[in-house]
Image (spheres, rainbow, N blue to C red):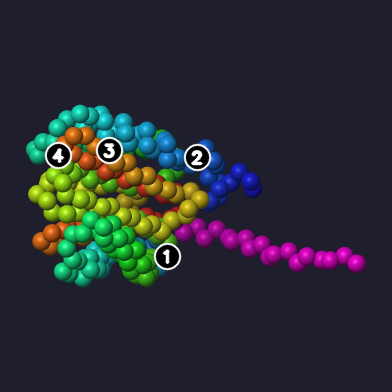
Amino acid sequence: MEDFEVAEKQFLYENTYITSPEGYGEGQKFQGGYVTKEVKNIITERMQGVSYDPARASQLGKELSDKIKETVKSMGYPRYKLVVQVTVGEKAGQCMRLASRCLWDTASDCCASAYCENESLFCVAMVYGLYYE
Amino acid sequence: MEDELGGPGLREDQLVTTEEVDTVIREAVESTIGTSAFQHNKINAWTSNVVEGALKRLASLQKPFKYVVTVALVQKSGGGVHTASTSLWDSNTDGKMTLCWENSTMHCIVSVYWLAI
């Protein structure tokens, strides 16, 4: 008696021929303005009354970047790959400059950034949305 | 197909490796800042040069990727700095690399993210 194994159904997706986010519908392009507002709210809220603690600061950075990623995901950009970077530092009178450049498609990709500070620390959050063709 | 990774048509030699990016970034940082001491009036030019030099060298690798390069130049003054990042990507083809370079007067933290088209 032979045992027949049921093969898994192989799905072959047809080409959609859609090359830009607008092809998927209105509002599918990464909206930098809305994302900036949301990110600013998140970091301002989280930073309320927090003072710099070297042991906890890295945890704070990770929490913030996870929260921002989840929020931006829920804003509904399914065709976008996201990169979120959060920098948290102690205010110690040092001079600091943060810069970024990207090699991307200017028609479909965008970035959003927000800055917040209080008496003892500062926080910079940057979100990049890159369209996945 | 055994030789196709991630999306259709991305062969192994077309992927970006951490070592490649590390070499590229180190070159960019060292050629701009090298052994200079921190100078407030040069910081703008330095950050732009590091970031643009890095991006130009990455683009010359001629691989089908989008790149995001961030650089933080911090003067050494005893204050702490932490950087955290999360991403939503395809782990077969995409990646990131962070380089922490320093000299006696400043820290330079460069992060590069590469995402397949």
SS assignment at label 1: loop
- Residue at 31% of width from left, 31% of height from top? B27
Q: Which residue is mark 3?
A: B101
Q: Which residue is mark 4?
A: B43
Give the Cα distance between marks 2 and 4: 35 Å
Q: Which residue is mark 2?
A: B14
Q: Which residue is mark 1?
A: A78
Measuring from the top left, give residue A43's x and y in whole percent.
22, 65
Q: Give the magenta range.
A: A1-20
Q: Is residue B114 shown left or right of residue B102?
A: right
Asked whether residue A13 is drawn in magenta, I would say: yes
Viewer-proximal residue, B43 or B15? B43
Give the Cα distance between marks 4 and 3: 15 Å
Give the Cα distance between marks 3 and 1: 36 Å
Residue depth check, mark 1 versus mark 4: number of the one nearer the observer? 4
The picture quadrant where one finds residue A112 is bottom left
Asked whether residue A133 is drawn in magenta, I would say: no
- Residue at 53% of width from left, 51% of height from top? B6
